[in-house]
Image (spheres, rainbow, N blue to C red):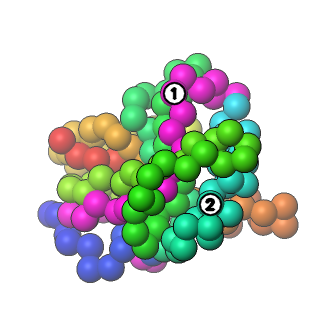
């Protein structure tokens, strides 16, 4: 059964089991990377957020949800993804930050999605994705691209990795 999300799905309580929702698109500001080495993902996140928050402030945009990464193809040794934040309105035109990073408006897709919350360290996300995709298929749904991770718990050096929440989301065909 598909539920309509009554509030932003990325602000809801943890999804303890695979849940299918009908959601609207969400306006975002992102850095898009293509063929980026998987080993450089942490660097992409760090450089994006170092540039993103000052750029949003300079353009009067407000974050309205947690950070995410949206994957437009299945990762291999490299990844094609957008890293960013949901915002209150679109960025009018792309902005190149002082670091050389280009930020642009985009969106998290609307439509039928499957979602589940992963509680634990980032290094266990691979296993969580595998279990999630298997559960989605066993429930009779067909995952589609793109898929995304929502980093509900903001990482910090003091954070207990076991308490971190990452929502796993896939568009459904």
The residue to which callout 1 is attached is 34
Foreground pick, 122 / 46: 46
Q: List the single residue furthest toward the top.
A: 77
Taking the magenta stretch, the answer to whether it contains residue 30 is yes
Q: Is residue 150 visible?
A: no
Using a 10 Å C-alpha cutoff, classify the residue at mark 1 as few (fewer than 14 neighbours), some (14 to 19) or many (20 or more). few
Tell me which corner region of the image, top left, top right, bottom left or bottom right, holds residue 155: bottom right
Q: Secondary structure at mark 1?
A: strand
Q: Position of residue 31 (x, y in %)?
A: 54, 44
Please give the name of the residue rendered at 39% of the width and 51% of the height, measured from the top-left corner. 106
Q: List the single residue furthest toward the bottom.
A: 6
Taking the magenta stretch, the answer to whether it contains residue 25 is yes
Tell me which corner region of the image, top left, top right, bottom left or bottom right, holds residue 144: top left
Foreground pick, 9 / 67: 67
Q: Position of residue 113 (x, y in %)?
A: 27, 54
Q: Earlier in the sequence, mark 1 or mark 2?
A: 1
The residue to which callout 2 is attached is 55
Seen in the image, is 124 located left or right of residue 26? right
The region drawn magenta spans: 12-39
Tell me which corner region of the image, top left, top right, bottom left or bottom right, holds residue 151: bottom right
Question: Mark 1, mark 2: which one is toward the viewer?
Answer: 2
Q: Secondary structure at mark 2?
A: helix
Considering only vertical position in the picture, is 171 above or below 12?
A: above
Secondary structure that dominates the magenta span = strand
Using a 10 Å C-alpha cutoff, classify the residue at mark 2 as few (fewer than 14 neighbours), some (14 to 19) or many (20 or more). some
Considering only vertical position in the picture, is 74 above or below 104?
A: above
Q: Position of residue 76 (x, y in %)?
A: 52, 21
Q: Is residue 59 visible?
A: yes
Q: Position of residue 101 (x, y in %)?
A: 64, 41
């Amino acid at each position: 059964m598909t539920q309509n999300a009554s509030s932003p799905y990325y602000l809801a309580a943890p999804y303890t089991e695979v849940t299918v929702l009908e959601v609207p698109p969400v306006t975002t500001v992102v850095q898009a990377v293509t063929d980026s080495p998987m080993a450089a993902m942490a660097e992409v996140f760090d450089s994006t957020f170092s540039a993103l928050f000052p750029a949003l402030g300079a353009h009067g945009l407000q974050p309205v949800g947690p950070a995410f990464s949206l994957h437009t193809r299945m990762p291999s040794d490299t990844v094609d993804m957008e890293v960013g934040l949901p915002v209150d309105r679109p960025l009018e035109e792309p902005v190149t930050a002082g670091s050389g990073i280009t930020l642009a408006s985009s969106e998290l897709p609307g439509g039928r999605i499957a979602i589940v919350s992963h509680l634990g360290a980032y290094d266990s996300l691979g296993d969580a994705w595998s279990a999630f995709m298997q559960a989605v298929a066993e429930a009779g749904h067909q995952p589609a691209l793109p898929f995304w991770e929502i980093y509900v718990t903001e990482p910090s050096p003091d954070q207990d990795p076991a308490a971190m929440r990452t929502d796993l989301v896939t568009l459904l065909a």
